[in-house]
Amino acid sequence: MAETGHPERRREAFFGRLKGPKLRQHQADLIETRLPSLRLDLAQPAPDALARLFAAPVERFRLEIGFGGGEHLLHRSGEDPTCGFIGVEPFVNGMAKLLSALDEAPRDNLRLFDDDATLVLDWLPDASLDAVDLNYPDPWPKKKHFKRRFVNARNLDRFARVLKPGGLFRFASDIDTYVDWTLRHAADHPAFEWTARRPVDWHEPFKDWPGTRYEAKAIREGRTPAYLTFRRTKP
């Protein structure tokens, strides 16, 4: 796991497995040799200018929380080379899959973190991000586990702090109870407004959406995804 710079703090927002099936040797090697050069070092203060984190000249900044196998992150970072992307994924197999893809399609506008996303959110400077993406997060469908859902008042406070005025929080899910949960929590938060004006605005995928394997599975199983966009209002 990454050196977080918060040795006294336990994981706050990740409750799933950290590892799946044994990695292939090449994937294991990438975790050992490639990830360190891309991993954020939270033991160091975050730079006031986030552009210093990236090898490429970038002008905007976007955080993806829980990128799974990295399909969406790889697509977005490739289509928008002037944006600096930070991808967070604690699940080792997902990180290994993305690193394997980066072998074929390197990115100079991408940094990674392999632990709890709240550590990154607390490390980033105020008003430093243009967008936060949370796609198909673990729904924790049992009521007794709702408190584990990443969308909650405290994390919305974190989003509000790191997003620039006008910045976007995008959320995609196929679980109705989590969609309703997110709408309620965002509606209760003074820093966010839902951008939808018509039903089609949240039934249609985001612009240039590449799809994810979780979405494909949901559609195969007869569930309808929702795509919610919330704007950070001015203070």
Image (cartoon, rainbow, N blue to C red):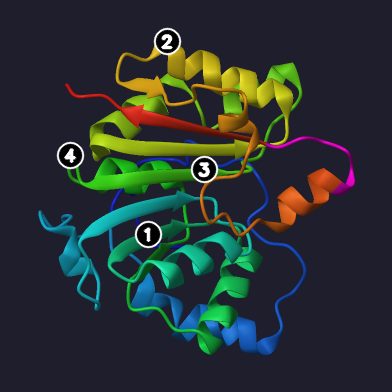
Residue for point 54% across, 45% down: 206
The residue pinned by badge 1 equals 86
Near mark 2 (Cα within 10 A), the count class, few <14, some 14-19 or many ≥20, is few
Which kind of residue does numbered mark 3 sit on? Leu
The residue pinned by badge 3 equals 134
Which kind of residue does numbered mark 4 sit on? Asp
The quadrant holding residue 127 is: top left
Residue 187 location in percent, x, y? Answer: 44, 13
Looking at the image, residue 47 sits to the left or right of residue 217; the answer is left
Residue for point 63% across, 18% down: 180
182 or 141: nearer the viewer:
182
Local SS, label 3? strand
CA gap, disc 2 and disc 3:
19 Å
- Circles 4 and 1: CB distance less than 8 Å? no
Q: Is residue 224 magenta?
A: yes
- Circles 1 and 3: CB distance less than 8 Å? no
Q: Earlier in the sequence, mark 2 or mark 3?
A: 3
Span shown in magenta: 220-225
Viewer can see residue 43: no
Residue for point 47% across, 41% down: 11
Which kind of residue does numbered mark 2 sit on? Asp
The residue pinned by badge 4 equals 126
The residue pinned by badge 2 equals 188
The dot on residue 76 is none
